[in-house]
Amino acid sequence: MTNIQLTSTINEDNTLTLALQDIPMPQPSADEVVIRIEAAPLNPSDLGVLFSAANISTATQSGSKQNPVITADVPNKFMPALKNRIGKTMPVGNEGAGTVVAAGSSPAAQALMGKTVAVIGGGTYRQYHCANIQSCLILKEGTTAKEGASSFVNPLTALAMVETMRAEGHKAIIHAAAASNLGQMLNRICIADGVDLINIVRKPEQETLLRDMGAKYVVNSSSNTFIADLTAAAIDTGATIAFDPIGGGQLTSDILNCMEAAAARNAGEYSVYGTDTFKQVYIYGALNRGPITLNRNFGFAWGINGFLLFNALGKLGSETVATMRKRVADEITTTFASHYTHEVSFTEALTLHSIESYSQQATGKKYLITPHK
Amino acid sequence: MTNIQLTSTINEDNTLTLALQDIPMPQPSADEVVIRIEAAPLNPSDLGVLFSAANISTATQSGSKQNPVITADVPNKFMPALKNRIGKTMPVGNEGAGTVVAAGSSPAAQALMGKTVAVIGGGTYRQYHCANIQSCLILKEGTTAKEGASSFVNPLTALAMVETMRAEGHKAIIHAAAASNLGQMLNRICIADGVDLINIVRKPEQETLLRDMGAKYVVNSSSNTFIADLTAAAIDTGATIAFDPIGGGQLTSDILNCMEAAAARNAGEYSVYGTDTFKQVYIYGALNRGPITLNRNFGFAWGINGFLLFNALGKLGSETVATMRKRVADEITTTFASHYTHEVSFTEALTLHSIESYSQQATGKKYLITPHK
């Protein structure tokens, strides 16, 4: 029985190598289980590990059809920042789902035998993955591994956004790149929970998609009236917290300025320091790796922070997180349903054609890896 | 007896007017006192109220020598953001010091009669200022009003930086524009308290100034080795919090990247999300009003926030603030001593020559207003 995994390596000669590797079948310790991974999504966060700082347009394919190897150049300027991973063969894949085929000696581990579970944690792009039972989520009877493959990253991130909004005392949310799988989930959660959500998209068809899903506030950042539209929606909802996966460019700045303009509209006295209304933007991705430009017309009551799921869950606390996980398992085929446009095996994932496609991180295009296909 | 005050007005015709105005002598209520203001500093925060968004290079002088009027253009694009102050004659001046010449009926107010006090709160650029006793700080016997004129804004801001560092669990500070009056205070506090401080300056003479004052870490942002120097100092001190009054440009970004590089040096495993070390920059001014450019090589564990003294004091709590105020009164001629290069009367402050000079906000140039001169 093989145990193939997909790996990414930065080499000393300024290249990146993607390859398959046969690794030993894992032996679970007392609180661990071995999961036959049947499906694992390619999330933007996985692409970060997979491609790192490599220039994908230079990618070439070698090796055999059964054992493809992809090589791409890494610009020299990025090498110093990558020194901790040079020469290390890194497993990839932050989540996935499959069947528990072996379990450690503890009763809790034994209880998972034969179950279909979702799992979070590094290295799910392999055929058999060993994980602590705390990293597993038991899927409901009848839920397939494909349905449950994206049970953690997007669902918990979307829920963490709403919980962070509540914990920090805001009452409505602005979300950028809102037509993504994550954005659609957030839209469904907000509708279910009665939270106002302002969806920022770039294209008319994304506006339509979200409106058809019941979104009340959708604004198009490509429109000439974007700033006015976003300000009007901020006035209407009182949104003072935003989540932005893009980063590069002016969107974060635009969001803060629109929130401040909305707050100033209701502010009494003028202050040179801006309004007292605290405005927060969390940047949770780097879809645009270019510089973030802040045009500061938003006073002094503001914060911009990096947002990382694990840190956010740590802040929210274990009780809240347990409730969030249960909700995901209960609603994985509805609220938290993911939609994939492509299903690929390991060898299909390592073709230039596939890589060119999924490296674009285009909204509406999403890959699922099936390691046993 | 006159009570002249200096005022700033944004007019509907896109102009700013600075003028003197004779106002009634105030009547203190029970917990208030009337202070004959003998000295009040021109802080950068005052310039924000004074000049607002006006283009100072267009300033012209009219009126008489006794009653000068300064007029300057306000670019049309800024007018919408200023709508809450259009047509309002605004008093200026955030702090000052003088003698209590009248007091309300409460024993606490009566106890201040004849004392030299420092005062915080809007409108100190007037001859007689009425303030709540909570806004007053009794200066020690022998301290003059000129010595005590800057008892709040700079001293409490510098102390608030150190207390914020402690409250948020950091162990060393990076400070930009560090040769300022505020920076010199912060340097003295950090030396006294044994806190490592990395001073960022722009000029060799500022390096010398701070080193002569005992500063251990001084780095010059104009130097070719700035990034390496700042990173080395961050490694040496473990500084993960910074205070930046500049804002515009790349300095905030440089600081975060250097802190991250320092943290990565000691990080074990590589992570695509950067290190776990949380890095914070507080922006407490707008010496450069241009765009802030963030070149994001600092992972996801970071925050950038506006920093405003009153909000910071609110977070620190009243007990800490009371201790801070006492320290200021005790050490106003040593740790918290301010240095002024110019002393001007109201009419002298409203000449084109003076305005051209103090509007530059140049480090090492500081004005003190003496309303009774």
Image (cartoon, coloured by chain):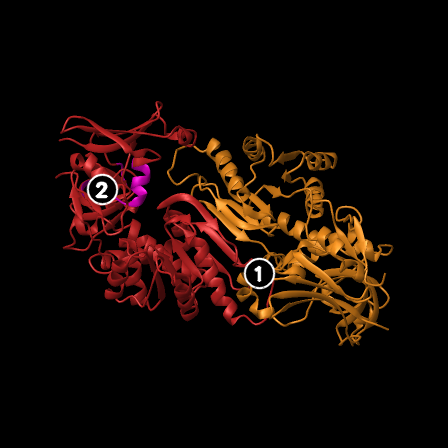
Chain colours: A red, B orange
- Which quarter of the rendering shows the N terminus of chain B? bottom right
Q: Is residue B194 above or below residue B33?
A: above
Residue A152 point in image, percent of width and height: 28, 50
Quadrant in the picture for residue A2:
top left
Q: Which mark is residue A357?
A: 2
| Residue depicted at x 16% and y 34% | A347
Residue B169 horizontal/vertical position (percent): 55, 46
Q: A224 left or right of B176? A: left
Binning the other alpha carbons within 10 Å of mark 1 as few (below 14), some (14 to 19) or many (20 upward) gives few
- For the record, the magenta segment spans A29-50
Amino acid carrying mark 1 in the image = Pro
- Seen in the picture, residue B126 relative to B322 is either above or below; the reply is below
**Label 2 is placed on what type of residue?**
Ser
Q: Which residue is mark 1?
A: B75
> Number of numbered discs present?
2
Q: Position of residue A254 (x, y in %)?
A: 44, 57
Q: Alpha-carbon distance for marks 1 and 2?
A: 48 Å
Q: Nearer the viewer, mark 1 or mark 2?
A: 1
Picture quadrant of residue A354: top left
Residue B238 position, x and y percent, is 56, 37
Q: Quadrant of residue A351?
A: top left
Front one among B361 and B244: B361
Q: Is residue B368 magenta?
A: no
Q: Nearer the viewer, residue A292 or A197?
A: A292
Is residue A23 at all visible to an observer of this figure?
Answer: no
Residue A129 horizontal side relative to residue B168, left or right: left
Residue in the image at 80% along x and 49% along y: B333
Q: Is residue B143 visible?
A: yes
A248 and A83: which is toward the camera: A248
- Looking at the image, which residue is at 31% across and 59% down? A186
Residue A189 appears left or right of A354: right
Q: Secondary structure at mark 1?
A: loop
